[in-house]
Structures are given as structure tokens and as C-alpha cells.
Amino acid sequence: MRIAVIGLGYIGLPTAIMFASAGHEVVGLEIREDIVKKLNSGRAHIAEPEVEERLRRAVEEGKLRATTNPEDIKGADAFIICVQTPLKDGKVDLSYLENAVRTVAGVIERGALVIIESTVPPGTTLRMARLIEELTGLKVGQDFHMAHAPERVMPGRIFHELVYNSRIIGGVTPESAKRAEILYHSFVRGEILLTDATTAEMVKLMENTFRDVNIALANEFALLAHQYGVNVIEAIRLANTHPRVSIHWPGIGVGGHCLPKDPYLLLSGAREDFGLIRKAREINEDMPLFAKDLLFDAFKEAGVPREDAIVVVLGLAYKGDSDDTRNSPALAFIEAIEGDVADVRTYDPFVGGTHESVEKAVKGADAIVIATDHSIFRSLNWEQLGRLMRTRILVDGRHVVKDPPKGFVFRGIGRGDV
Ligand SMILES: NC(=O)c1ccc[n+]([C@@H]2O[C@H](COP(=O)([O-])OP(=O)(O)OC[C@H]3O[C@@H](n4cnc5c(N)ncnc54)[C@H](O)[C@@H]3O)[C@@H](O)[C@H]2O)c1
Ligand SMILES: CC(=O)N[C@@H]1[C@@H](OP(=O)(O)OP(=O)(O)OC[C@H]2O[C@@H](n3ccc(=O)[nH]c3=O)[C@H](O)[C@@H]2O)O[C@H](CO)[C@@H](O)[C@@H]1O
């Protein structure tokens, strides 16, 4: 088949690669010229295990190319839309999606299948089908087919999960769902479950809201542990030995392109607001401020005037071993302290523009704050790093450090025991 993937980001690029390696002829349409250039030369613009080798192979075999020109996807058999669906000023911004749908409407031919992979508020796929009908005069279910195939992959494990995760496909019509199922069977080994488009949209949003609310509960447990002098990490480990309990992990916050906005996408079309989901968001959004309180408390104990303090933030990415800084709590934390301290330095081996090494970053500093759980941070020798510092304060926002290192004023989220 000739497949057009629209939007070549964290989701679109791996999806395009998988369809190409399954033997389809794939053209990726992307509005960013720099991304297109890079991809066509076989280099990936995202950090994800295996992406670079797999991309190079697909490009060399002539199965995948990127373009900025919508004419290059004219007459494709399937259009797979993977553009971002962010929040803008607290509101769902569907402008990227709508632009992509308009582009598809300009090049679609009879018989084609249009799939929205982007996460969207319930009812959006049906609305987009109507938009294509209006713009083209074609009839959905008759002249073209349309489905929502939400993406469930976990960054860091994308190429494994694309193949082995089960998948929900919601058709605007039953025939649309069946056609999309056949298409995804070209590389998916997990189960494919068919439903209607609006149910599929809600399922995706429920999954991420479930995770967000559970993390909020873990964060509230962490706040409580500070009240009771308990190490919440130890307490969660013990609680999770119960056969029906599986508590998530607390931390400096919840970032990424998905969890901070998907609960709001779920609420966006509702006539009533029920409270729990929004409250969970508030708890998670406030966690960087709690980390700030821990840091300022440590300044007091160490006798460091905060206006003189040099703070090093370890990790800018929203989660470990990723280069993605979208909605990262590390950035929210930096914003929260910036005006109060003398200097904020950063070190993140996955993100450009930070200090070249952890040693250089911590030299002469007063405090280290761990904001991301990159694997390499687990093997750092804190006592050795401490010798380079002016004052030894360590704040662990991601339970990376098990035992407080000697000679440090130590604080940790959920570490009510120290
Ligand atoms: N990142 C994840 O882990 C993840 C997982 C599951 C679902 N999702 C959902 O998938 C969607 C995409 O997320 P992402 O992280 O890949 O976003 P992204 O920002 O990495 O990628 C989107 C790409 O689309 C391009 N684009 C925007 N408008 C376009 C247009 N009209 N034509 C062509 N290209 C266009 C952008 O330039 C960008 O490169 C979102 O709805 C997200 O919620 C993301
Ligand atoms: C339901 C689900 O599993 N959805 C996944 C999720 O993937 P994600 O990349 O957003 O990753 P998460 O691991 O959820 O992390 C998000 C943030 O929460 C912090 N966190 C995490 C666990 C915890 O116990 N305590 C925490 O504090 C973490 O540090 C980070 O900042 O959404 C994707 C897009 O829709 C899905 O495709 C993907 O399946």
C-alpha cells in the first residue's frame, strides 16, 4: 500500500518506520523542513532506542521518505495523522489536527482510509470525518473510510510496544474499523480490538487519566509521609506486596506530551466537572513547588542564604533516559526557583545546551536537585561530587538515591524519614 504518515514526531516517525519495514511504500509529511532534511539523510531527530538504525534501513531500502509537500501524498491508500494535540493557555489546541485533516482533504482520493492516531477529545474523529465530507463532497463509509487508532506506546520502548501492545481501533463505520485492522496487522502482533471512534477516543484518555490520578495518589502519600516521618518509597514497596495493591511512584512532577494534558482533553467536552480528575492534576502540578520547599528547607539547615545559592538541576527531560522536555517538571521547578537563587545550572546528557559534564556543573555549587531519573544518575558517586561543591545539599526528586550520602544535607520527595 501507499501510506502517508502526517507528522513525524515521537509517534509518527516510529509508526512510519514500522509500516515501511512491513513492506509498504511510506511517505511522511512534516511541516518542519529541518526534520525532513535530517530524516531523508537517515538521521533521527528524536532519542529512542533503535530509531536511528531502523530509520536508516527504511530510507536506504527506498521504503520511506519525508517531504514537506502535500502533493507527494496525493492519492495515498491510507493517511495516518500523528500530529501533536497540546493545550494552549489551558485549552485543547486542535489546530494542528485540523490543519492536517484539511491537508488530507486536499489530496484524498476515493477508497482511501484516514486514521487519526493523535490523542483527541471524544467526538473529534466524527467531527473530522464531517469536515472531510464538507471539503471534498465524499461520503464517509462509502467513498472513504475513517478510524481512530490511538497510540499506547511508552517512549523508551516504542519499537517493542508498537508490535506487541494490544490496540484499540474505533471506526467511524464498522467497515472503516475493519480496514484499519487489516492495515495495522501488517506489523502488530498484539490483539486488535474494534469499537466505534468515540469509544476509542475515550479509552485512550481513560488510560492516561488512570495513570495521572494514580500518580497523584502516590504524590499525596509522599506528602503524608513527610507528616509522619516515614520513607514513602519503602512504604509503597511494602504496600505493593498486597495482591491487589499497585501504588505508583511519587516525584517532582508529571511531565511529557501526554499525562499533563490528556485528563483535560477528557474533561474538555463534558457538561459537568466531577472533581477527582482535576484535583489529581492540581496535586501533580504542585509537586515542583513541594520540591522547592524541600530545597529551601535544606538551605536553612545548611545555613546558605538562598539569594547566594548556586543550584544544579540534574535532568531536564520529563522522564528517565529520554530527551523530551515537553511539560517537564524540571523546567517548572527551575522557573519556580530562578528568581530566588543566585544561579541555576543544568546537566542532562540527553538534552542539548546543558553543562558538558556533571563534574563541571556541580563545581562550586551549593545544591544538587535530581529532577529526572536518568539511569546514569543512579551510579553517580555523590561523596566524590560533594568534594567539588561549596555546600553539600542534595534534593532527590525522583528517588534515585537510596541512602543519604555522607556529609550532605539531604532531602527527598516522600523521604519523611530524613
Ligand atoms: N509522545 C508520546 O509518548 C505519545 C504516546 C501516545 C500518543 N501520543 C499522541 O500522539 C500525538 C503526537 O504526539 P508526538 O509526541 O509524536 O508529537 P510531536 O510533536 O513529537 O510530533 C508531531 C509532529 O507533527 C508535525 N506537524 C504538526 N502539524 C502538521 C501538519 N499539519 N502537517 C504535517 N506535520 C505536522 C510537527 O511538526 C511535529 O513534528 C499527540 O496527540 C499525542 O498526545 C503521544
Ligand atoms: C497509561 C500509560 O501508561 N500511558 C503512557 C504514558 O507515557 P509517558 O511517556 O507519558 O510516561 P509515564 O511513565 O507515564 O510518565 C509520565 C510522567 O509521570 C511521571 N511518573 C510516572 C510514573 C510514576 O509512577 N510516577 C511518576 O511521577 C514520570 O516521571 C513522567 O514525568 O503516556 C503515553 C502517551 O499517551 C502512553 O502512550 C503511554 O502508554
Image (tube, rainbow, N blue to C red):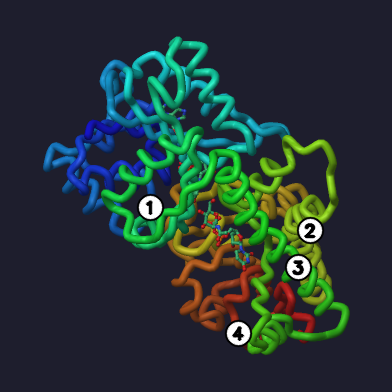
Instruction: Count the labels in the image.
Output: 4
Q: Earlier in the sequence, mark 4 or mark 2?
A: 2
Type of the residue with mark 2: Ile
The label on residue 283 is: 2
Type of the residue with mark 4: Lys
The label on residue 62 is: none
Type of the residue with mark 1: Ala
Image x and y of residue 84, in percent:
51, 36
Give the residue at mark 1: 47
> Element under label 4?
loop
- The answer for how far apart the CA atoms under marks 3 and 4 are is 22 Å
Closer-to-camera residue (112/215): 112
| Disc nearest the viewer among 3 and 1 | 3
- The answer for how far apart the CA atoms under marks 3 and 2 are is 9 Å
Tell me if residue 267 can be seen.
Answer: yes
Closer-to-camera residue (115/352): 115
Identify the residue shown where x is 72% and y is 72%.
413
Identify the residue shown where x is 62% and y is 46%.
202
Whether label 3 touches label 4, CB < 8 Å: no
Assign ligand 2 to one image quadrant.
bottom right
Q: Earlier in the sequence, mark 3 or mark 4?
A: 3
> Element under label 3?
helix
| Disc nearest the viewer among 1 and 4 | 1
Give the residue at mark 3: 217
| Disc nearest the viewer among 1 and 2 | 2
Give the residue at mark 4: 402
Type of the residue with mark 3: Leu
